[in-house]
Amino acid sequence: MNRAARRRPALATTALALLGALSLTACTGGPVPATGKARAADPASRPDLKPFYGQRLQWTDCATDGYECARLTVPLDYARPGNGRTFVLPVARAAATGPARRIGSLVYNPGGPGAGGASSLEEGMDEAFGAAVRARFDIVSFDPRGVGGSVPALTCEPAEAEAEAEETSEDFSDAVAPLYPRTEAARSAAASGARTAAEDCEEHSGPILRHVGTEDAARDLDVLRAALGERELTYLGWSYGTSLGTSYAEQFPRRVRAMVMDGAIDPSLDWRQRVISQSAGFRRSVDDYAEQCAEIAGDSCPGANPQEIRALIERLYQRAEREPLPVAEDSTYAEYGGMDATAVLDAVSMAMYTPEDQWEPLSEALREADQGDATKLGALDDEVETEDPGTAEEEQEEQEEDEIPEPPADNGDAALTAVNCLDVPHPRSLRPYWAALAPADQAAGVYGTAGVTADLTCRDWPSGGRRPHRVDADGVAPVLVVGTTGDPATPYEESVSLAEQFPEGMLLTYEGLGHTAYGRGDTCVTAQVDAYLVKRERVRPGATC
């Protein structure tokens, strides 16, 4: 899915392999055999993986008070784990507040793909969990391979000198992309831009691109489980984290103690079905915004009624397709000549994640953009850059060959594209993309057509081994799926489907707006999820909050 599934402000506000020496010690967490149909032998029993499974995490104080940090080493290529090439992943934990009754570690993934778990924890993500869970578990997260403080990390951005050269040779004001490329010229430009993006990633991160998919990240999660000393995994995944959890459950079904999937992604959908599902979710959420703006954002709404709000948004899209919307000189979009239609659509879409926090500033930004100044609209997605608390620089100094460009402070966009393209097979020919435009337009309007063109980058991407499929996790413990009826990024229907696919899967429905449910303050959701995680209490069929 080509839009980031990030955590909401209320919670935390959402390239070449190293040749490094392993410093691995005594084994923790014994192997648990998987008994599903035609399953591979337990990886922990493989001699070439035992050094990784035998790690003991060396915890030290993080840069942020109250948290502990460590680093986990995993093989770059699980097919050849002994070749010396590795990823070194940041790990962070918040200790259980009730150590006398501690159950163990609870590992979470905040979403993405491309969100760093270790950094999100240091930013206070543990507060998203209920008090009962924080008392009984150490809350743990990690940066997945290629993401954030991972060494090596993905980068698709040209080096500074290259970027400057490109900027001097391009006139960004002439590069306005339509949300629905109807003409041959528009489609050719869209395909060319996507090819360039893929080539940039291949040039700067080529040697690791084939090794950052979800299946490998799930294997890393099992290495982390062993390094934490846990025989079974207790896990919570938000959004993309549900894909990671599903992959783990399929590969290691007997190692799951409890697993919560909040804002689920259905693994049975192909690339086109995924685009239409998510794009329709965003379209519905923007309609919800128009209908319920006054209720949540009050007098700041940019129209007197839903019709006026829809008309304003459509007017901005049309203007931005003709010419980028003006912004102030200090805006992120100033160097591009303003906000084009895709940038406007992205800003509106991202504001659907947490209505309680984002609809009021969105309303003010839309009003000002309609009056000729899109600066606030362009700033909606701005995030504060922080120093990487890890030791990536020290790890990179150990590199013995093949220097790689230093990744940006936030490589979430690169990781988002890399993981999505690797996980979901995409056509190599252009014809299927153009054929998908009309159905996407019918199902989701410009949100659908923009989603199709965004997926063009994957046409020129390395192929992964995953295929659309229904969950195969025989023997897994009952899994709890939480679905939000008004979720823009992971539509409720996908949560219903995932719960049905898991053996003994349970569905908890949250009737509300915004992306995901747990951690947003609803006491009903908190109580039921916490009871499941702590006591493994089952959620009754039809449970709704």
Image: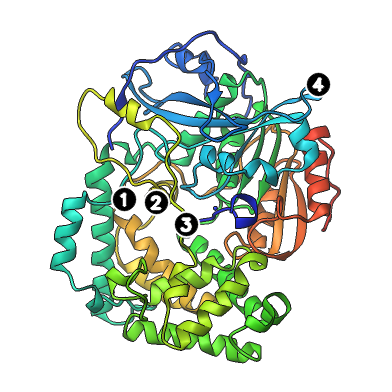
Q: Earlier in the sequence, mark 4 or mark 1?
A: 4
Q: Residue at x 25, y 77 (%)?
A: 173
Q: Residue at x 56, y 31 (%)?
A: 92
Indicate left or right for 35 with 477 as reference: left
Q: Residue at x 60, y 46 (%)?
A: 242
**Kind of residue sitting beneath label 2:** Cys
Separation of residues labelled 1 and 2 (CA atoms):
6 Å
Residue that mark 1 sits on:
461
Q: Residue at x 47, y 57 (%)?
A: 383
Q: Which mark is residue 383?
A: 3
Separation of residues labelled 3 and 2 (CA atoms):
25 Å
> Residue 473's image quarter?
top right
**Kind of residue sitting beneath label 1:** Trp
Q: In front here: 292 or 447?
A: 292
On screen, 494 above or below 433?
above
Residue that mark 4 sits on:
100
Q: Are marks 1 and 3 in contact (CB under 8 Å)?
A: no
The secondary structure type at the circle numbered 4 is helix
Separation of residues labelled 4 and 1 (CA atoms):
50 Å
Label 4 neighbour load within 10 Å: few <14, some 14-19, many 20+ = few
**Kind of residue sitting beneath label 3:** Glu
Q: Earlier in the sequence, mark 2 or mark 4?
A: 4
Q: Earlier in the sequence, mark 1 or mark 3?
A: 3
The secondary structure type at the circle numbered 3 is loop
On screen, 325 above or below 156?
below
Separation of residues labelled 2 and 4 (CA atoms):
45 Å
Indicate left or right for 155 with 63 as reference: left
Q: Are marks 1 and 2 in contact (CB under 8 Å)?
A: yes
The secondary structure type at the circle numbered 2 is helix
